[in-house]
Image (spheres, helix red, strand yellow):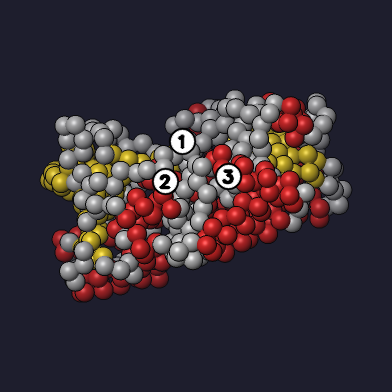
Amino acid sequence: MTSPSLRVAIVGAGPAGIYAGNILAHTVGAAGGTVAIDLFDSLPAPYGLIRYGVAPDHPRIKGIVNSLHEMLDAGSIRFVGNVEIGRDLAIEDLQERYDAVILATGAIRDAALDIPGIDLPGSYGAADFVAWFDGHPDVPREWPLTASEVAVIGNGNVALDVARVLAKHAADLSSTEVPDNVLAGLEASAVTAVHVFGRRGPLDVKFTPIELRELGEVPDVDIVLADEDFAELELAAGSSNQLKVILRTFQAWRARGTTGASRRLHLHFWHAPVAVLGEERVEALRFERTAAGADGIVRGTGELRDIPVQAVYRAVGYYGTPVVDAPFDAVRGVIPNVEGRVVSIAPELDPVSEPAPIPGLYATGWIKRGPVGLIGHTKSDAMETIAHLVADAAAGALPAPAVDGDILALLDDQGVEYTTWDGWLALDAHERALGAAHRHTRERVKVVPRDEQVEVSRAGSLTLS
């Protein structure tokens, strides 16, 4: 069956949105149809968390960026940046002009950690800190790094990213794309000890072996492990190679011991956070020691420990980014959906009657399934969502657009300074030129202020047009 001609809007220009657009273009094209795809993002630049949520010292991320670049540069997807749905455009504006709308807004906020004292000054969300050192335009340019002893709560990759950046000397990040204001902040950092806490054991960590090994390669930083956390620790029969590598890494660090480095990174296990202590600001963290029972369930032992720190970062997960006037499950932090088809109420809240999909509205990525999984999961998410969208189009189940005309005309009429793919190419070239001219000769130096990004992008867009 020949696929019909479609117009589709995707909200969110991170990996989830870009993969969805690329899969949609190939699927419809292979069926002999045509599709016009507009990819909207609230930021002036594309790539979402790949640009603003990954530590700058991860060179392997460049491969993902290159892949996403190729997808957008192919010309089948039109990028429209610096446009926030709910502020510059309503979701209704999209629904009136497109056959389908795919929400791929991801998750950029920190999940809550509901313990006493968590809101004391000196307590931060890891996502906010990551956004700062990645040069996100909507966070403050300065970050308080006045604490000498810092705690990071969490045992995932984000926790390790935060801990590694806090423990590193600024000079060891000077060759990356980290913005100049961040380098200046890290150079003035008072941090000498970083403590990372997990409520489960060393073999239950959520970070990858690669992330773990990178810690041991940080210059002038000692990794400190407590013998009590490894007592009677054995690999279960049939354990994965990943777990074996993780255990070997831990054992190598324990055998090496400390070297007298100027900074220390402590990895604590079997510690469940109970409270943040302090009068006017963070002074310590209280933990309950935990242990795994015969059934494998981790429970508190009743033993409490207070560990002095002057700052704490919670890295216990992300929380989805809602879209104004779209359904949202505030408990799970996702847009309620059934296999990518958006529904008005979360299925688990109405187990009796099957929720009916909202015609023409879809979700993909973290906002669809929650903030778990890697890039491979994002691709499979997009494939499932696009399969349903194409099936709905073939069945005539998509609402026909009620308003004709290019959405850019509406943005022009409203005075929205949107950015384009040509504009991103100009900003990309500008940042690379800044890097080449830098005293450390870097691949790029990120432009941080939003207005400067927009100015460079729009001026470059006119030049390239």
Image spot of residue 131 (x, y percent): 44, 46
Which amino acid is tagged 1?
A: Arg
Kind of element beneath mark 1: loop
The reply, left or right, for residue 204 in relation to residue 58 is: left
Kind of element beneath mark 3: helix
Q: Are marks 2 and 1 in contact (CB under 8 Å)?
A: no
Which residue has dot 2 on it? 132
The residue depicted at 50 percent of the width and 31 percent of the height is 329
In the picture, the disc for residue 56 is none
Image spot of residue 219 (x, y percent): 30, 68
Image spot of residue 257 (x, y percent): 18, 71
Which amino acid is tagged 2?
A: Trp
Mark 1 or 3: the one toward you = 3
Kind of element beneath mark 2: helix
Which of the 4 quarters of the picture holds residue 12? top right
Q: CA distance from mark 3 to mark 2?
A: 16 Å
Mark 2 or 1: the one toward you = 2
Badge 3 or badge 2: first in the primary sequence: 2
Which residue has dot 3 on it? 453
Badge 2 or badge 1: first in the primary sequence: 2
Which of the 4 quarters of the picture holds residue 215? bottom left
Q: Are marks 1 and 3 in contact (CB under 8 Å)?
A: no
Q: CA distance from mark 2 to mark 1?
A: 26 Å
Q: Nearer the viewer, residue 391 or 451?
A: 451
Badge 1 or badge 3: first in the primary sequence: 1
Which residue has dot 1 on it? 332
Badge 2 crowding class, 10 Å Cα cut-off, few under 14, some 14 to 19, many 20 or more, is many
Which amino acid is tagged 3?
A: Gln
